[in-house]
Amino acid sequence: MKENKLSIIINKPIHEVFAFTLDPANTSKWISEIEVEETSEWPVKIGTIYRNKSRIGIWNQYKLVELIENHSFTLRSNTDENFSVRYSFTELSEGSTVFEYFEWTEYTNISDPFKLDSLKVLKSILETQD
């Protein structure tokens, strides 16, 4: 599989969903494989490096290559430019957002495709927040 696209409706305004997923302090709250994530600068901009550490101690780096506020952002692997991931946000109504997670590779198959379970966790966290 060279592409994996998942989406979920989150009953929160688009700006809240966008801000939560962009913030590296929140990544480990909804992606169980990630222990910690940090960025080279805050606020982020094109060229910012995201670094995350998996629960088994492996560090990965991604460069922010696209950033459109409340619409989308894209990260490309710094160690393997073959892999990219885009987070996209579409407003359904004032308090409802479609969140799409799209990952792809250029040359090889995705070794560990993202699962819908993580998006369900994200939805649960955001919808129970005040």
Image (cartoon, helix red, strand yellow):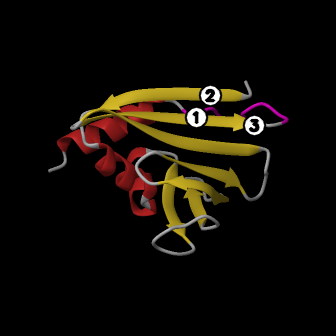
Q: Which residues are magenta?
A: 107-114
Q: Residue at point 72% right, 33% down? A: 110
Question: Dot 2: what SS?
Answer: strand
- Compared with 48, 96 (above or below) is above
- Compared with 20, 100 (above or below) is above
Residue wearing tag 3: 105
| Residue 69 in picture, x, y percent from top left | 44, 54
| Residue 15 in picture, x, y percent from top left | 32, 50
Residue wearing tag 2: 4
Q: Earlier in the sequence, mark 3 or mark 2?
A: 2
Q: Amino acid at mark 1?
A: Phe
Residue at the top extreme, as displayed: 1
Q: Are circles 1 and 2 on residues that touch, CB within 8 Å?
A: yes
Is the magenta region chiefly helix, strand or loop? loop
Residue wearing tag 1: 102
Question: Dot 3: what SS?
Answer: strand
The Cα–Cα distance between marks 1 and 2, rounded to whole angstroms, is 6 Å
Left or right: where does residue 98 sit relative to residue 124?
right
Q: Is residue 58 magenta?
A: no
Q: Quadrant of the N terminus?
A: top right
